[in-house]
Every structure is written in structure tokens, then in C-alpha cells.
Amino acid sequence: MKKIISFSICFALFYTQVLANELLVVSRKNSKQSQKWQEEVSKGYPKSEIGSVTPVKILEVDDAGRLPEWVVKAVKEGRIGEIVGVPTFIIWDELTKKELGRLTGYTQKSMFYSQLSKAFSQISQGLRPDLREVREGSGGSHQDEGSGSKQQREGSGGMSQDIMDHIYKTPEEAKRASEMLGLGGEIHSHETPQGIIYMPGSTMKR
């Protein structure tokens, strides 16, 4: 009987924790990946198994690259990690007001749900996942080769304006992309589990 009561209490605490979670979607109107997620996932997400217990809250980055004030504060206090691009999907614990893990970037619906499920599995093991998706054919998908896509290297004609399409292994490549995007050669870097990456422009404003 004591075991049953103990199990019931543990299950109730776990269920309460799950219900306290939200999926914060850091998005931007001119981001192709953000738009693709909206089209392929957004409407059906609430009916999914994960979506039924982890509601979505959209956080729009404005035209100046600014985040909502409460997010800025949470980043400064270390309750949310640095946001390096859009879309970023943050698993947020509303009880403790802290990030539990995240998924960065979007490629396709099946991969999104697979990565999100993996993130929740890691969280249940006491880990803080930082999973990344990179668009096929983008600079990000060529990180191991140390270069962006051929189109990105050759010029600005048709060059994507989505910062998540421009992730490079060297500062020189990021600088070239920055110049082609009209950002004056300005770049910034981020440390990742795979090593340092370089991106055009200044870091996302806080």
C-alpha cells in the first residue's frame, strides 16, 4: 500500500512538472526557417502528444533584433541561455522560471518532433539538451567542411537573409558573408559542443 501511495505521489509530481513546461518559440517574420515551422508544425502542434501537455508561446524578435524584455532579463540572469538564431525552441519550466533545454533551427516536421522528443527524454535523465537542426545546403550543414554553400560563397544574388543559413567554421568566411549581406564585415562567434562557429553581423540584441 505504501508503495502504491509513493508511486502516486511521484507520478503526481511528475505530471505537475510536465504541465508546467512551455515551448517558447523564438521566431522572426523574415526568417525562412521560422515561416516553414509555422506552416508545417504550428497549427497541428497543439493536437500532438507533446503539444497536448507542452503549449507553445511565440516570442517574436522585432526588426531591430530585440527580444521581449522579460526574455532579455532571463538571459542576463542566466535562466535562459544565449539565443544565437531563429527559430530557437526553448523548453521552459514555468515553475522555476528556467530553461530546461532547447532545439535550434528547423528543417522538417518529422525531424522537429524527433529532436523534441529526444530533448524531453534527456531532460527526464537530468540533462540539459542543446540540439541543433541545420538546413540542408546551408552554411550550417557544411560546418565539418569549413565552408558555406557554393551560392553563399559566390555572391549575394539570391543570398538568404536568414542568419541561421550562415554558420561558418572560420571568421574569414563569416566576414565575407557579412560584407555580402551589407553588414559591413561585422561578425560574432559562439562556442558549441562541436567547436567555435562564426556568424555574420553583431550578436542578437538584448
Image (cartoon, rainbow, N blue to C red):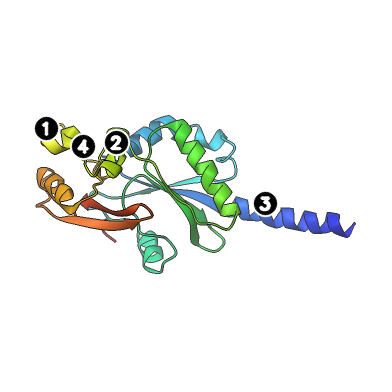
Q: Residue at x 62, y 55 (%)?
A: 17
Inspect the image, locate mark 4, and give the three-letter code of the amino acid beneath it. Answer: Ser
CA gap, disc 1 and disc 4? 9 Å
Q: Are marks 4 and 2 in contact (CB under 8 Å)?
A: yes
CA gap, disc 3 and disc 1? 51 Å
Q: Please give the count of numbered marks on the rendered protein.
A: 4
Q: Where the N terminus falls, by quadrant?
A: bottom right
CA gap, disc 4 and disc 2? 9 Å
Q: Nearer the viewer, mark 3 or mark 1?
A: 1
Q: Which residue is mark 4?
A: 160
Label 2: how many residues lie within 10 Å, few (<14), some (14-19) or many (20+)?
some
Q: Which residue is mark 2?
A: 32
Label 4: how many residues lie within 10 Å, few (<14), some (14-19) or many (20+)?
some
Q: Callout 1: helix, strand or loop? A: loop
Inspect the image, locate mark 1, and give the three-letter code of the amino acid beneath it. Answer: Gly
Between disc 4 and disc 2, whose residue precedes? 2
| Residue 28 point in image, percent of width and height | 31, 44
Q: Which residue is mark 1?
A: 157
Disc ID at residue 137: none
CA gap, disc 2 and disc 3? 35 Å
58 horizontally vs 188: left or right: right
Inspect the image, locate mark 2, and give the three-letter code of the amino acid beneath it. Answer: Lys
Above-or-below relation of 36 to 82: above
Between disc 3 and disc 1, whose residue precedes? 3
